[in-house]
Image (cartoon, grey):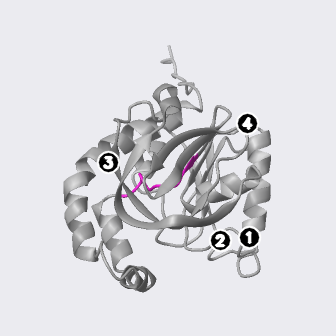
Amino acid sequence: MKLLVFQHVAFEILGTLNPLLKDAGFRIRYVNYSRHPDAEPNIEGYHGLVVLGGPMNVDQTDRHPHLDTEVRLIRKAIERKMPILGICLGAQLVAKALGADVAPSPEKEIGWYPVRPTAEAADDPLLQHFDESEQIFQWHGDTFAIPDGAVHLASSPGCPNQAFRYGDKVYGFQFHMEVDPSLIERWLKIPSHQEELHALKGPPGPDQIREETARHMARLSQLADTTFRNFVRLFGERKVYRQLPSR
C-alpha cells in the first residue's frame, strides 16, 4: 500500500509512526512543502494520507500558498474515504477541510499536559485504550473547532478540542504522540522554539520539559504504539502472497 505524507518543516516528522508503517509494508512518499511549496501531488493511487505539524497558521496562505493546496487535497482524500491522520497543524488542516474554524487556543500548550478521552472515545477504534487521563506531549498555539458531523474524542483543561474522528477513517490529533526523547530534544534546540518558550515567561522551561519527558515517555510510547497500530488497521488486512516451490 502507498501512503502520502504532507510535511511542512524538516523537524516535524513521522517519528515513532514511521517504523510501524514500514513494518506494515507501506510505501511512503513525502511531499515536503518547505522545499517544494508549489507541489501538487496526485492522490490517485494512494491508499492513505498523513498530514504532519508545522509552525504556520492554516490561514497564512499568502505566505504559504500550499496550505490551500493541502486543504483541497484533503477534501479529495475524504471523498475517496481514505484513512487520514492529521497531527497538530495537520489536524487543523483536516478540520478546515471539513469546514471547521481554526483559531488561537485558549492556552498555548508546550510540554506535557493531561489529556482526557471523552465518553465517545471508549468505543473509538484508535483511542479506546486511553485511561481516564493521560500525559501527552504538546506544542501548539492554535486549535480547531470540532467539525460538523465529527466525534469529539479528547480534551485538555486548557484546550477543549484535542482529538476528533470524522466518519470511520479520518482523525485529527492536536497533540503529538509520535515524539520520542531525541525528537523532543531536537525541538528544544530550535531557535524559534526557544523563543516561544522564553516568551511564555514561566513554566515549562526546557529543563522541566526534559524532566517530564523522562517521567512520561514510557507510557506515551505504549499509547502511541497501540494508537498507530490501530490506525494501520483502518487500511484492512494486507494480502500476503506465498510463492509455491517449483517442482
Q: Which residue is mark 4?
A: 81
Numbered tag placed on residue 66 in the rendering: 1
Quadrant for residue 215, please give it. Answer: bottom left
- Residue type highlighted by circle 4: Lys
User: CA–CA distance between discs 3 and 2?
Assistant: 29 Å
Q: Is residue 39 visible?
A: no
Q: Secondary structure at mark 1?
A: helix
Q: Name the mark nearer the viewer: 3 or 4.
A: 3
Residue placed furthest toward the top: 247
The part of the chain drawn in magenta is 172-179
Q: Secondary structure at mark 4?
A: loop
- Residue type highlighted by circle 2: Tyr
70 is within the stretch colored magenta: no
Q: Are marks 2 and 1 in contact (CB under 8 Å)?
A: yes
Q: Which residue is mark 2?
A: 33
Q: Which residue is rendered at x = 25% and y = 52% of the image?
A: 216
Q: Earlier in the sequence, mark 3 or mark 2?
A: 2
Q: Which residue is mark 3?
A: 220
- Residue type highlighted by circle 1: His
User: CA–CA distance between discs 3 and 1?
Assistant: 32 Å
